[in-house]
Each structure stands twice: as C-alpha cells, then as structure tokens.
C-alpha cells in the first residue's frame, strides 16, 4: 500500500500541472493514463489470482483523496477506471481470463443506470440503448453498461461488456466543472453480447464471501462507489483550504494602506472555520470507510450499514463544498480569473455534487426511511 500511496503523491503534482490543459481538452492527457498504469493503479484492486494487487478500499480511497489535491476531475476519472476493474473481475472466470490475458486490467467506463435493453437470444443478448455520463470513455478499450432484460413476465437487469469499437460515443460533456472527466454518452445499436460477457445485477453489485487475495470481495458496490466518489471533493477541499492559508499571508487588501489580509481577525476566523469544516468532512468519511470495511469482515453488510456509508459520502461532499465556499467567499474577485486554481476546485466540486448518489434530498429521505425500519424500494441505490 505504501508504494501506491507514494506514487499517487508524486502523480498528484503532475495532475496539478496538467489540470488546465485537461480541462481544455475535456479529457485526461494520454501520459496521465500511462503514468497511472505504470504506478499500478488500474490493477490495484484486481485479485492476486488474476495478477492484480489485491488491495482494499482504504488504499483506493486514500489514493483518490491524494490525487484530488492535484486535480479532482482527474482523481474522479482515474478512481472510476480503477473501480471498474474490480467490477470486471467479478465476471465469469473465462471472461476475466480473456480480458486480462495481456495485462491485469482494462480501461472500462461503466455508466450504471439501466437505460438500455438486453434481449435474450441464442448464446447471449442483443443490446441496444443510450447511457449517460460514461466517465473516461475517451480512454476506453471496453465499456460496461447496465441494461433491462427484455423478457416478458419478468423484471431483471444485467451488466454487459462490449469492446470499444462496438459502441458509439456522443460528445455531450460541455460543463462548467469536472470537464476533464470526459463523461460523454455511450450509444449501442443492436449489438450481440455473448452470455459470458454478462452478469446479473445482484452478482455484480452485492457483497460476496471474503476471498483470499481479494480484499474487496465482501464489499457492496454502492457503498464503495459512494465513499470513493466523495474522495475527490474532500481532496479538493483540503487543497482549497491550504491555498487559502498561503493566500492569507501574501494578499494585500484593496483600498487599504498595504494591510495584509492575515492581519484581519475575521480572516483568521475564516481560516479556522474552513479547517473545522474540512476536518469534519474527513472524520465522517474515514469513519464510514472503517465501518463498512469492519461490517464486511464480520458478516454481510446490512441495509442500514450500506445506507450509513451512502449518507456519510453525501455528508462528506456537503461539508467539502461548505469548506470551499468558506475560503472562496473570503478570497476576493481575483480567484475567479480563469487561471486560478481555487475557482477550478470550486467549479469541479459544484458539478461533482450533482451525481445522483450525492443528491442530498433523496439520500437523506432514504436514510431516514431506513432508520425508521422501512424497506427501500427495488430502485433505491443502497
């Protein structure tokens, strides 16, 4: 774990330097993908039996937080591509061996909303649909999508894998923040997918029994997705507070006789407030990571365990946004120049919070429902 953390600390500096270009390109620089591969990121969660690192949630979460100090959009993209190798490793053994024949990882974006159909045919499925927000699709060699099984009298969904050359990408990702994620739309038009390249929703998304050499096997996907996806917001908030600390000691206030902002008691209060907010966000996040991991080690995490992780993730993003707003509100107009890192961090987190898993109203209502002993519906993400 120490090696991969050290690699991410170095890569974070590179991501910071490349962030303006990545934002203009609306995708990561190819060298960033190569460097992440060389650092062993994409294979870090792949079970050791398939040649991967077999590392766990703590490693992935911490790597993502550190990478976000340099660029939240890059941290988001890289962490999703890492997580998706964990998902691919849950497919049937012969499929995993096929995909990992040359290297123990693939680049497979995975829009999870079941917005397409999979029609059963002899030997597999014919898949058609349109999936939004395929983060990292510009770097893909495979694509993993979620589809409703078109079979009269039943309701089920399956995940299916297709090579990149069998899908179309629609360039829709023109956003104010998180631009470097390149989260464009995937379109599939009546493509055949062999049965072995598909897997039922429960088999992919639910926790399984612990497996030696696979530290992630017992973890439920939604809880992992929520907590890891919150890490770029937390890392961005930590970076923003540190930038504000540096700015205070240097900034001379306009319409004064050379007064430094650090000499104002209110500025020192604002710094302490932001530190309190970001430390609270990190404490909530780290406790949730520990709790879901502990629950998975002793028994299958309950609905309440899984919901607690999702609520903590949404809280982490909420507190991180608050910390960034605290420092930006006290930083003057110049931080909104296009070359300012603070404004990019703020824009990225404002867009990041729009992910459905962080929708505070929906998340909090569901958490309250479960706390009252009521069951979630079949479409709730828990």
Image (tube, rainbow, N blue to C red):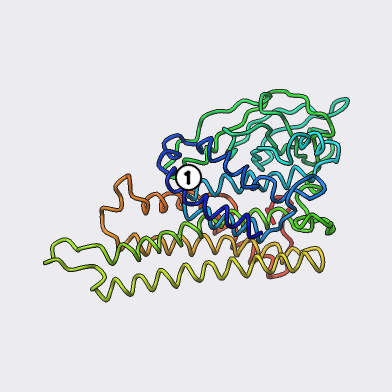
Q: Secondary structure at mark 1?
A: loop
| In the image, residue 200 above or below residue 243 | above
270 displayed left or right of 164: left
| In the image, residue 330 above or below residue 30 | below
Please tell me which residue is depicted at 84% across the width and 40% down the height of the picture.
92
- The residue furthest right is 122
378 displayed left or right of 242: right
Where's the N terminus, which quadrant? bottom right
| In the image, residue 231 above or below residue 81 | below
Residue 288 position in % (x across, y down): 64, 67
Q: Nearer the viewer, residue 162 or 150?
A: 162
338 displayed left or right of 57: left
* Disc 1: CA contacts within 10 A as few (<14), some (14-19) or many (>=20): many
Residue 116 position in % (x across, y down): 69, 33
Residue 295 position by quadrant: bottom right
Please tell me which residue is depicted at 75% across the width and 53% down the height of the picture.
54
| In the image, residue 371 above or below residue 98 | below
Q: How many marks?
A: 1
Q: Nearer the viewer, residue 254 or 374?
A: 254
Residue underneath mark 1 = 178
Residue 81 position in % (x across, y down): 63, 43
Where's the C terminus, which quadrant? bottom right
Residue 95 position by quadrant: top right
């Amino acid at each position: 774990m120490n090696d991969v953390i050290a690699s991410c600390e170095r890569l974070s500096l590179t991501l910071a330097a490349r962030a303006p270009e990545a934002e203009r390109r609306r995708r990561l620089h190819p060298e960033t993908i190569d460097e992440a591969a060389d650092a062993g990121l994409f294979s870090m969660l792949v079970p050791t039996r398939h040649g991967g690192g077999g590392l766990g949630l703590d490693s992935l979460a911490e790597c993502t937080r550190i990478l976000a100090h340099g660029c939240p959009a890059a941290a988001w993209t890289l962490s999703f591509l890492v997580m998706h190798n964990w998902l691919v490793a849950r497919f049937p053994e012969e499929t995993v061996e096929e995909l990992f024949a040359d290297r123990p990882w693939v680049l497979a974006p995975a829009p999870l909303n079941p917005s397409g159909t999979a029609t059963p045919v002899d030997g597999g499925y014919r898949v058609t649909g349109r999936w939004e927000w395929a983060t990292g699709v510009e770097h893909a060699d495979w694509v993993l999508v979620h589809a409703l099984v078109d079979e009269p009298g039943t309701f089920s969904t399956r995940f299916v894998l297709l090579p990149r050359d069998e899908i179309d990408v629609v360039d829709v990702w023109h956003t104010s923040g998180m631009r470097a994620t390149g989260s464009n739309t995937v379109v599939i038009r009546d493509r055949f997918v062999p049965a072995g390249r598909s897997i039922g929703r429960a088999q992919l998304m639910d926790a399984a029994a612990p497996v030696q050499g696979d530290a992630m096997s017992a973890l439920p996907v939604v809880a992992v997705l929520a907590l890891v996806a919150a890490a770029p917001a937390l890392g961005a908030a930590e970076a923003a507070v540190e930038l504000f600390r540096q700015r205070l000691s240097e900034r001379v206030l306009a319409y004064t006789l050379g007064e430094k902002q650090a000499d104002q008691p209110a500025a020192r209060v604002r710094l302490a407030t932001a530190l309190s907010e970001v430390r609270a966000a990190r404490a909530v996040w780290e406790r949730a990571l520990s709790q879901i991991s502990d629950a998975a080690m002793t028994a299958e995490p309950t609905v309440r365990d899984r919901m607690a992780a999702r609520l903590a993730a949404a809280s982490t993003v909420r507190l991180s946004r608050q910390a960034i707003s605290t420092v930006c509100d006290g930083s003057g107009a110049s931080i909104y120049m296009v070359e300012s890192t603070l404004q990019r961090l703020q824009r990225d987190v404002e867009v990041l919070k729009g992910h459905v898993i962080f929708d505070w109203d929906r998340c909090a209502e569901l958490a309250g429902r479960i706390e009252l002993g009521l069951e979630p519906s079949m479409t709730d993400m828990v």
